[in-house]
Image: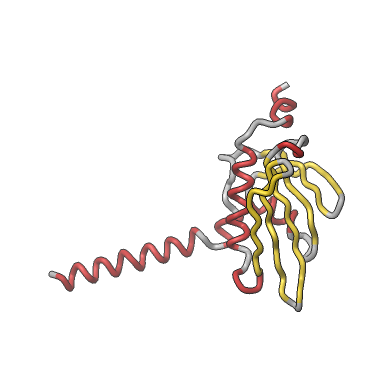
Amino acid sequence: MWGTLGVIFLILLLSFGVWYSITNSLPFLIEKDMFDGETKTFVFKKNGKEKALKIKKANDALNSITSTRTSSGSISFDPKREDGLHLIFSMWESGGVHHMTIIEMDGEKVIQEDEYNLEEKGLVPAVHRMIDLIERMSSTSSVWDEVSSD
């Protein structure tokens, strides 16, 4: 009996491991529909140039951030971002190793700053952080919502 229960437990544990690996893989994460089929517009500033960035899937934001191996900028949901939640990012290379920093800001206040070694851990931890922050930014109303409802 204990042998059978042990085998069942082992199978369940392995099944969970496979499920967790698939749902936390980069291809799965970046194709995730972030806003239930809706596309939201963010303010995207990279290397000093600002534009509107439409995000439906995590891949939309990731492609914009990583289009060059060294860059810096910000993503915010509200054009009046000096008072709201926004993300500041930078990517750079040091000694042949690529790094990424993601800083969560609320106005001028730093909420959390995370640095990722992309060679060591890959993009997955940074993408998890980016998705979380973008989803939280979009949960607040913004000028874009007021413009689109007119």
Give whichever of 127, 4 is nearer the camera.
127
Question: Which quadrant would residue 52 be assigned to in this image?
Answer: top right
Please indicate whether residue 76 sits to the left or right of residue 49 in the image: left
Q: Residue furthest right?
A: 48
| Image quadrant where residue 82 sits | top right
Query: Compared to 92, does 80 lie above or below?
Result: above
Residue depicted at 70% across the width and 45% down the height: 109
Q: In the displayed image of the protein, which residue is found farthest to the bottom?
A: 95
Q: Quadrant of the C terminus?
A: top right
Closest to the observer: 23 or 80? 80
Number of callouts: 0
Residue sitting at the far left: 1
Query: Where does the image place residue 108, in percent across and percent down from the top left?
Result: 74, 44
At 72% across and 41% down in the image, what residue appears? 107
**Up-down relation of residue 124 to residue 93 (above or below):** above
For residue 40, which quarter of the picture?
top right
Q: In the displayed image of the protein, which residue is found farthest to the front?
A: 109
Q: Residue at x 70, y 31 (%)?
A: 142
Q: Is 39 placed left or right of 52 in the picture?
A: left
> Could you say where residue 25 lies in the image, as x and y percent from the top left?
54, 62
Q: Is residue 11 left or right of residue 133?
A: left
Which residue does the image show at 42% across and 61% down from the upper left?
Answer: 19
Pick the front one: 136 or 52: 136
Picture layout, residue 86 above or below residue 139:
below
Specify the quadrant that holds the N terminus: bottom left
Q: How is the image coloured?
A: secondary structure
Left or right, 99 with respect to 37, comes to right
- Where in the figure is residue 9, as x and y percent of width and height? 26, 66
Q: Position of residue 24 (x, y in %)?
A: 51, 60
User: In the displayed structure, would residue 142 be above or below residue 98?
Assistant: above
